[in-house]
Image (cartoon, helix red, strand yellow):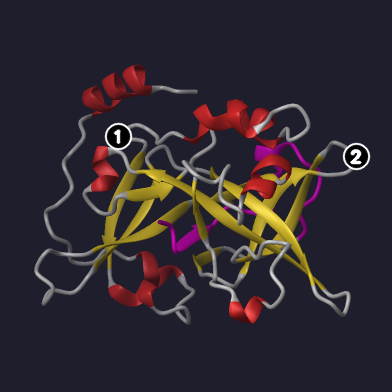
Amino acid sequence: MCGRFSLLASPEELCNHFEMQDLGVFPPRYNIAPTQPILTVGIGPTSEREAQLVRWGLIPHWVKDPNDFTLIINARSETANTKASFKTAMRHRRVLIPATGFYEWHRPSDKTQPKQAYWIKPSHGGIVCFAGLVETWMGKDGSEMDTGCILTTQSNQQIGNIHHRMPVIIQPSDYEQWLDCKTQEPRDVASLTQGVEDGFFEAIAVSDRVNKVANVGPEVQEPGLAEAILPKVSAKKAKQDSNQMDLF
C-alpha cells in the first residue's frame, strides 16, 4: 500500500515536467497523509493537462454519507476495473499523482519489535508519478468534494522485503496513454500498471518521526536504524533487470 508520500519538487520543476504553464505556489511537502489535499494532473475540458487538488481518500459518487464509508486511499490495480468503488473512475477519471518518494513500514516477524519506516525514493532522483483515480462526490445540499486514491500493485523483489504492495508508477512516455480516457479503456492501459524493476527505487531507513502527521519537515527523512532486510542491487544487476522487465 501507500499511506504517506512526499512532494519536494518546486512548482517550476513540476511545470517543466508536465509541460504546463502554471501550477501556482506551494511549499515542499515531506509527509503527505490521508485526508490531506494532494496534487493531481489530468486532462481538462479543453483536452489540455490540468492540475487539481483533491482530498486523499476516494469517495465514490454513489456514497450517500461519507461518514459511513471507509476511507479509500489505495486501490488494487488488478481489480480496479471490476470493483464498484473504482470502475467508473478507472474508465473516465484516471490521473497522475506526482511525488518524489513514498514511505512504507516493515513489520518484523517478531511482534515485540517496532515497525521500521523507510523513505523510498527514485534512484535517479526527480519526480515520479503514481497512477491515480479521482471522483467528485456530491451531497444532497449541492456541496461537492473532489477526492482521489493511488493505485497499487505487487511489489518487486526489492521493495517486497519491506511490504508486498507498492504504488503503480506511470512512466513519462506513457502519460498520454494513461490520461487518455476517451480512447483508452482500462484494458488498454492494464500493461501500464505492472511493478517497476528492482533498482528503480532506493529505500532509506528513517526514524519513527514520519509516523506522526504533525511532523512535516525534512527531519522525517533523516536516516534511522534499520534491520538488514534489503538485498543490495548492483548497478549491473539493476541494468539487467531493467532490460528484462521493462514494460514501458
Nearest the viewer among 85 and 208 is: 85
What's the residue type where badge 1 is placed?
A: Asp
Upstream in sequence: badge 1 or badge 2: 2
In the picture, the disc for residue 46 is 2
In the picture, the disc for residue 123 is none
**Which residues make up the magenta segment?**
1-24
In the picture, the disc for residue 198 is 1
Image quadrant assignment for residue 114: bottom left
Q: Total of numbered circles in the picture? A: 2
Residue lying at 64% horizontally and 59% vertically, measured from the top left: 148
Query: Does residue 61 appear to the left or right of 101 in the view shown?
Result: right
Residue lying at 32% horizontally and 66% vertically, measured from the top left: 222
Task: Please tell me whether residue 17 is drawn above or below residue 152 in the rendered image.
Answer: above
Query: Does residue 123 appear to the left or right of 98 in the view shown?
Result: left
Image coordinates for residue 239, horizontal then vertical, percent: 30, 22
Query: Does residue 185 appear to the left or right of 119 in the view shown?
Result: right
